[in-house]
Image: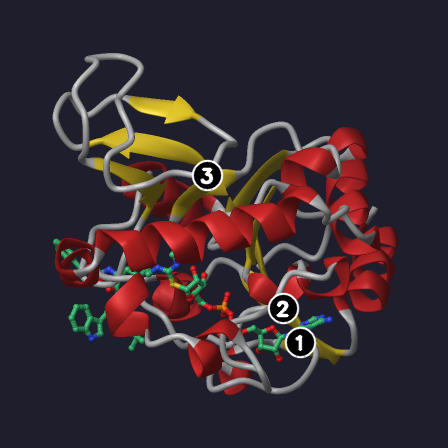
Amino acid sequence: MSAGPPRHVVVLTGAGVSAESGLGTFRDKDGLWTRYDLEEVATPEGFRRNPALVCEFYNARRENLRKARPNEAHRALAAFERRFQGRFTLITQNVDDLHEKGGSPDPVHMHGRLDELRCQHCAAVYAYDAPIAPDSVCPVCGREGGQRPNVVWFGEMPLHMDAIDAALADCDLFVAIGTSATVYPAAGFVGRVRAMGRARCAELNLEPTAASSLFDETRYGPASEVVPAFFAALS
Ligand code: BV8
């Protein structure tokens, strides 16, 4: 690992980076998975069984997102990317648009996006911000029904994995922010980067996680504090 400034920084964010913007996390106290059964609202089987419940779950989260604003962590990541001379890849597990609203130009949404729909008839992916229902009509092919949130459910393949694999293989600094390291394949990224032996790994989180021992450096505290401090010292 080089002692100088990094050449290629890869950042992986999870729900904790958006917690201070008022969006719930998944596994904290009163997190989403403590109030909803993941199997019912975040699996293809759950959508087939009860599409109205899944539409309602995502409509409520999108309504919540409308009121949310990026926080200092989102802004610090975007500011670093603007001034950094090397390569910067921002991978997010989040389906919110707060990285974009905070100024990040091109986050890689490996679990999809809350503000997009996918038609199961013609596979079109399109932006939408109105509530959806099981009988919503596709604006591309015009067929009724079969419109689903463009998010990756459990048991489905995450998106952009080729680009993610290439970034993980090339980076010399890997930073995980606000993720409990519970959901794969994202939770396995730090192990893969360490096995390649070329990158320093840092974890910025509210508290230790299952993966903390795999990191060379860990900083605990709210993302809005630890993220600006970490990236200010980096450049
Ligand atoms: C896959 C999108 C394979 C939807 C999400 C059985 C069957 C099938 C698959 C599996 C199985 N068993 C295991 C698996 C694999 C499974 C998995 O990992 N399950 C877990 C539960 C064990 N993974 C999958 O299914 C993935 N796909 O494996 O496909 C495949 C192979 C070939 C072909 C086809 C398929 C897909 C996983 C994606 C699921 N979708 N979300 C939606 O959002 O509604 S996952 C969901 O959890 C979120 O997207 C989120 O990204 C993800 C991880 O959660 P975190 O972001 O880490 O959030 P969490 O609440 O857990 O933690 C928050 C952290 O922040 C905490 O540490 C907290 O301390 C910290 N924090 C809180 N406040 C702050 C803070 N930090 C800083 N500041 C603060 N203020």
How crowded is the residue under tag 1: few (<14 C-alpha within 10 Å), some, or many (20+)? few
How far from the left and from the top, in percent, is residue 25?
Answer: 57, 70
Residue 131 — which label?
A: 3
30 or 108, nearer to the observer: 30
**Pointer 2: what residue?**
202
Q: Are marks 1 and 3 in contact (CB under 8 Å)?
A: no
The residue closer to the viewer here, 160 or 156, is: 156
3D distance between C-alphas at marks 1 and 3 = 42 Å
Task: Compute the Cα span from label 1 to label 2.
Answer: 5 Å
Decide which of 9, 39 is in the foreground and name it.
39
User: Residue 176, position in %: x, y?
Assistant: 57, 64
Instruction: Give me the residue at 81% from left, 38% from top.
Output: 79
Asked which secondary structure carries label 3, the reply is loop
Q: Which residue is mark 1?
A: 217
Quadrant of the rendered image containing residue 189: bottom left
The x and y percentages for residue 41 are 31, 63
First-in-chain label (1 vs 2): 2
In which quadrant is the N terminus drawn? Answer: bottom right
- At x 55%, y 83%, the residue is 212
Q: Are marks 1 and 2 in contact (CB under 8 Å)?
A: yes
Asked if disc 1 is less than 8 Å from ligand 1, the answer is: no
From mark 2 to mark 3, how far is it between C-alphas? 39 Å
In the picture, the disc for residue 176 is none
